Image: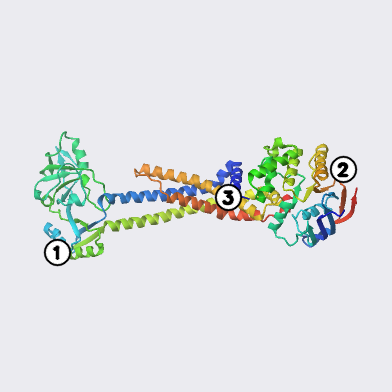
Amino acid sequence: MQLKRHFVEAIANLLSNKLRTFLAVLGILVGTASVVAMISGGKLATRQALAQFKALGTNLLSVQINKNSNNSSSNEGMDLSTILAVKQASPQIEKIAPYTNLYVPITYEGHVINGGILGVTASMKSVMKIAMESGRFISFLDTHENFCVIGQDIYQAIKNYSVGDPIGQQINVADNYFTIIGVAKAWQANSFIYADPNNSLLVPIETSKLLSKYANIDSVIFRVNSNADIDTLQNQIKNYYSSMDPGADFYFQSAKEIIASMQKQQEILTVFLGFIGSISLLVGGIGVMNIMLVSVTERRREIGIRLAIGAKRKDIRIMFLIEAVVLSLFGGIVGVILGILISFIIAEAKHWGFTIFLLPPLIGFCVSSLAGIFFGYYPAYKASKLDPIETLRME
Amino acid sequence: MKLLPIINLSNIVKIYKSGSDDLLALNHINLIVSKGELTAIIGESGSGKSTLLNIIGLLDKPSSGIYQLSGIAVDELSDDELSVIRNQKIGFVFQSFFLLPRLNALQNVIMPLIYRGVHDKEAKLCGMAMLEKMGIEQLWHHKPSQMSGGQQQRVALARALIGEPEVILADEPTGSLDSKTGQEVMDLFIELNNHDRNTIIVVTHDQHISQQCRRVVRVHDGSIVSDEVN
């Protein structure tokens, strides 16, 4: 008997008892939907997390300089020229962007503005890829000047209190007046850089050191040659800085490391979620087996008739097996659609971009049909072993 | 003229094991049925006539003895080989028709051809011809539940005949029908036997039916007690 005919008969048979068919596949449906939704959602989240590095590039290395509390001899830390001189340590360093980060009262036209101060050098613009909306960025000529570039959030805040071009206006920082020389465009936040330019006043690094005695250069971002060996480079920088400032600890982070750990986390999450999905598929599969066993019992007479008119054991087995597979595939297809829908809703809710990935539906289809074959085999085998006389005997 | 034996049973014994007692259902049965015969097997319930029919129909295997079906010794064959022989050489008609309730008349009729691997279109042409022969071609799309008993038994007969079997085995074919419809079905058997030289074995306990058969085999307590030609 041709396979196609088996499929047609299986579908007709399942459609003849719609409610039962639906209840039987509910487990598979939910299992497949959760597997698809979880894997798709996980992939969307990873992509979202990695997108921030697309803008910024991955050839970044950052170092956090922490004062060693046991050693208070050098409270000042390294000065700017010492920090910048690290370039001699390795030719792999392309750009250096040290910065200070401090919080002092900021007011504009008498209104308090919530934000921080970032003391930066001209190189910060290209290292962090800050784009300007208007005006210009801090330049090396601005040393010690009371100039500032305002981040997008600050700009939105002061817009409430003034009309017209912000450039050239004065903003009060810890009782000093700063002239706004530029407005930065919104900068995409990045887990790699702790500074938030959007909510900051960017001032020349030398100026920032005058604002507070706590304004030490405690972070440096490096843009390095993309072929550089990060570990070697880290050691070179660390050795250099340690020799200059023995009283400090250095914590390095590289974009590549973060991406690797993010991907690792994602993999663990995917495996974990997949595992949960598999359990629901297992439960769903048992549901299919249960309904197939009931079906075999109900259709003993039919099996006997078919055997009497020439069906082989194999034909009976395939008939029930295909019915189980069609049943699970039906659950699988609806589950995949539902799963994609769920991942779409998640993506919409979290404002991620949405894409249909090929892999999760594929996994969903394969796993659900495999569940059908696996859990349908025993009932089908049982059906094929029935004795035709037993099944045809008059009750 | 010596007729070709279709069914040749020699020394067939069937023992049902039930606990400590063995039930001797068939006791050394010898029976030869030739091509073109219309034979009735009669006996009370429990006489062994149904067991005999099951063995002839290859649904059951004898405990001992040799059974040749149109020259083939069938006792050594596997389940699947028996299925093929049932499909090609035997047509069954049952007391309660045994049509598949989800399929329409035509789909029921062509089932043996489908299991034989005949293509759908060709099978359906044969099926329609067979329904026409039974006089119910206008009912081809009806489900069994939409047909009367007599119509259902005609569909079952069409299903039995479609594979052009060597022998038709009918187990109480009129048992579920009123006497008028039963007689119509019996007339069909007689017509098939006279006209197409079909070999037919009818198991019945109805004297009125068995009287219409040329040969009557009486079974009692697992043995053949008489074998008469009317």
Q: Which colour scheme is used?
A: rainbow
Q: In the image, is B154 to the left or to the right of A194?
A: right
Q: In the image, is A63 to the left or to the right of A204?
A: right
Residue B70, image x, y percentages = 78, 56
Q: Residue A324 carries which label?
A: 3
Amino acid carrying label 1: it is Met
| Pick the front one: A124 or A318 | A318
Q: In the image, is B63 to the left or to the right of A221?
A: right
Q: What element carries label 1?
A: helix
Which dot, 2 or 1, sits closer to the camera? 2
Amino acid carrying label 2: it is His
Q: Name the residue under label 2.
A: B208
Classify mark 2: residues with Cα within 10 Å, few (<14), some (14-19) or many (20+). few
Q: Distance between the residues labelled 2 and 3?
A: 48 Å
Amino acid carrying label 3: it is Ala
**Tags 2 and 3 both on a single chain:** no
Q: How far apart are marks 2 and 1 (CA)?
A: 121 Å
The answer for which chain carries disc 3 is A
Residue A247, placed above or below residue A391: below
| Number of marks drawn | 3
Classify mark 3: residues with Cα within 10 Å, few (<14), some (14-19) or many (20+). many
Q: Mark 1 points at which residue?
A: A244
Residue B12, placed above or below residue A8: below
In primary-sequence order, the first of circles 3 and 1 is 1
Residue A124, image x, y percentages = 18, 51
Task: Give residue B51's quadrant in the image.
Answer: bottom right
Q: Can residue A393 be seen in this view?
A: no
